[in-house]
Amino acid sequence: MINNNLILIILNTLISLIDVLLVLLPVLLSVAFMTIIERKQLAAHQRRVGPNTVGYYGILQPFSDALKLILKETVIPSQSNKILFYLAPVSTLIFSLLGWGIIPFGQGLTLFDFSLGILYTLALSSLGVYGVLFAGWSANSKYAFLGSLRSTAAMISYELILSSAILIVILLAGSFNFTTIIESQEAIWFVVPLLPVFIFYFISILAETSRTPFDLQEAESELVAGFFTEHSSIIFVFFFLAEYSSIVLFSCITAILFFGGYNMPELFVNNTFISLQAVVLGLKTCVFCFMFVWFRATLPRLRYDQLIEFCWLNLLPVAVAFIILVPCILVAFDIAPY
Amino acid sequence: MASVFSSFRYGYRYLQRQAHEQPVIFYSCVLGLIGPAMVMTIPPIRRKYGYVSPERPPTTYPLPNRARVPVSGYDDE
Amino acid sequence: MPPSGGFQQIRYKRNLPFRGPSGVVILAGVTAFCGYGFYRIGLGNLEKRELQREKAWSRIHLVPLLLAEGDRDAYRRQHAALEREKEIMKDVPGWEAGKDVYHNPRYRPADSIVVL
């Protein structure tokens, strides 16, 4: 009897592990390909060829890059706080990967259909700041420290705008659950009623993932590297993966919150075994990944004071105005959900 | 400084000046004030044109439409 | 000397490229777009509310029926349990089948129902 229970418990754990692996492995692969997509697309924007030697059209470049970085020597500053120095990249990567746990890839195709999914996502994106803070502080280098202070201030400021925009989406859908939000968009994608909100939402996720035009804190070519100046080899790979993972994750969340997630217009009857919903979500995610790189290729960098001022003096009043306006419209026309 | 501008504060000129000097704050206030204004004005207008709010979902069992009989003693005694 | 027919007209008109629709047009366009969006959202939310109302009413009407059905089933099973007790304990002298263990004649519902 006890033996049976033990086997059941082990089996259940194994099945959960396989579930998680089924999500995480493709996600990590997509993150790897995101790096090569970025390089190829930037090259195309600038009329260059881009990486094209490793594998066909250079698609194996990320793996060769990762191998090269892993084989390099890990240099730890002698005066650094070793535990936090290792913990920072690991925690950043884990927090950005944990976000995939509640993404619905299709009807019921999710690791965890959390009823407070939005709060979970916001909490994780707040926790991501700690990795940056630890990395800058533990390195015991003034460059890394200043970089981390700047990154942290910018991320915390723009998180305000991000959560305001998401709050407006919640007001329209009447739920914190990702699946319910997607189902509410059967009527229409939320980008249509919330077009101005979508614009400042996208600006804030650009800053949240510290992408151009808000990447002064870690400008690769001008400054050394921002908060991860002292990190090298494998722990640098972790930061790199975390950054691109959060780009893909935020693209996916954008597709879910504003563009109907796995919903699509019913153009034809799908009577095959292949779930097209996940493909639809993937395509929508790709569009936003493309936009991330497009913005990088187009826009110049903002100065740091401009960046913070833009957040607090320009975006915040607009966000507050929309937080007042949208529920008032819902009440005035008697169309509030529930 | 405040006394100089106090002559046209609360006036149209003041608003015009604000719209030029601090457009973001000004138009945010406008946008934010449109909301409460809509809540005040639109429902009466819609009711005047014969709009009836849809029935709300029930929160309890429907109460019977008769006088209540007070219970005395215990039923099982 | 000027050429015959005089000089050409000086083209003083500035040649400015079209800089896109004006602010008012953009504002009106975005407002119309968002208005349509809110209209569709309204239809969807009203339908959502109607479905919620239907669910609540159907529960209100179904719950008494299910409760009565459950009570009937519990009563039947209680009688069956009494019959079984009589059958099993028929050889024990002085055994009162179905007697309350608390020596209290007041009715109390069974704590557990044996499903056989």
Image (cartoon, coloured by chain):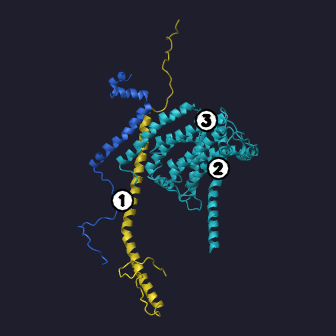
Q: Residues within 10 Å of mark 2 (few under 14, many from 20)?
A: some
Q: Tag 2, which chain?
A: A
Q: Classify 10 Å Cα crowding around label 1: few (below 14), some (14-19), many (20 and above).
A: some
Q: Which chain is blue?
A: B
Colour of chain C in the rendered structure image: yellow
The percent coordinates of residue A47 (x first, y second) are: 67, 35
Res A138 label: none
Q: Which subunit holds the residue at mark 3?
A: A
Distance in Å between CA atoms under marks 2 and 1 = 45 Å
**Of label 2 and label 3, which has the lower sequence position?**
2
Q: Amino acid at mark 1?
A: Pro
Q: Is residue A35 above or below residue A271?
A: above
Q: Secondary structure at mark 1?
A: loop
Cα separation between marks 1 and 3: 52 Å
- Numbered mark located on residue A217 in the image: 3
Do marks 1 and 3 share a subunit?
A: no
Residue A167 appears in the rendering:
yes
**Residue in view at x 41 percent, y 34 percent:** B27
Observer-nearest of A232 and C12? A232
Query: Is A6 situated left or right of C8 in this image?
Result: right
Residue assigned mark 2: A30
Mark 1 vs 3: CB contact within 8 A: no
Residue A65 x %, y %: 72, 44
> Is circle 2 on the same chain as circle 1?
no
Tell me the cyan chain. A
Kindly identify which residue carries mark 1: B57
